[in-house]
Image: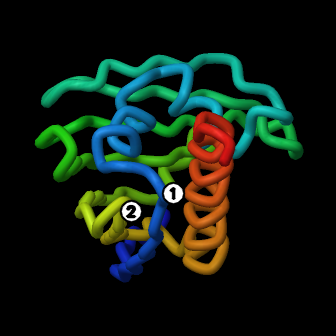
Amino acid sequence: MTRRSAAHTSFVLDRRFPAPPARVFRAWADPEAKRRWSDCHAETGTTEYSLDFRPGGREIHRAVLPDGKVQLVDKTFLEIVPEARIIFAYTIEAGGRHLSASLVTVEFEAEGAVTHLRLTEQLAYLDGHHDLDERRRGTGEGLDRLALDLAQDLPSA
């Protein structure tokens, strides 16, 4: 019999974007925008993507990884406060194996003409899986792509 376990950890990422909270928040709510900046496996074969951005709604992302395994990221939105906060839970599985379950809080705060975004992720790694450095790096890279996406829409000086 397989030994079952859950290892708990968390991380926080802070970013500042030169855009108002409404604009940064929209990048989370719009399916095309969200897929552009948050999809870390677009080049390796997304086979399904959907976003129903409302409390109780889901975001589904299925992709074929470089090793041929199918990865499924299944999110459920728990709370959405426009321009202020998003709370969602999600699971990741690869090759039919459940890897982790997470609770994520994303907070948006105006600081003059800048938005301070704070993302807090609480994770339960399942049955010996553990990729905290990779998860933190991948989430940070997504936020970096968000910054680039927002910069493309800024008026030039």
Label 2: how many Cα within 10 Å (few below 14, some 14–19, many 20+): some
Q: How is the image coloured?
A: rainbow
Q: Is residue 124 above or below residue 60?
A: below
Q: Residue at x 42, y 23 (%)?
A: 30
* Marks 1/2: CA–CA distance: 36 Å
> Which circle, 1 or 2, is nearer the viewer?
2
Rendered image quadrant of residue 47: top right
Q: Is residue 44 at least partly visible in the picture? A: yes
Q: Residue at x 29, y 40 (%)?
A: 22
The residue labelled by disc 2 is 114
Q: Secondary structure at mark 1?
A: strand
Residue 25 in the image, given as x and y percentages of width and height: 33, 41
Which amino acid, mark 1? Leu
Residue 7 in the image, given as x and y percentages of width and height: 38, 80
Which amino acid, mark 2? Val
Relative horizontal placement of residue 52, taking residue 86 as reference (left or right): right
The residue labelled by disc 1 is 99
- Please report whichever mark, 1 or 2, sits nearer to the chain's N-terminal start: 1
CB contact under 8 Å: marks 1 and 2: no
Farthest residue, direction front: 157
Q: Residue at x 60, y 38 (%)?
A: 155
Q: Secondary structure at mark 2?
A: strand
Q: Is residue 95 at least partly visible in the picture? A: no
Residue 21 in the image, given as x and y percentages of width and height: 30, 49
Rendered image quadrant of residue 59: top left
Depth check, front residue: 82 or 119? 82
Relative horizontal placement of residue 106, taking residue 16 as reference (left or right): left
Residue 77 in the image, given as x and y percentages of width and height: 23, 37
**Mark carried by residue 156:** none
Depth check, front residue: 56 or 13? 13
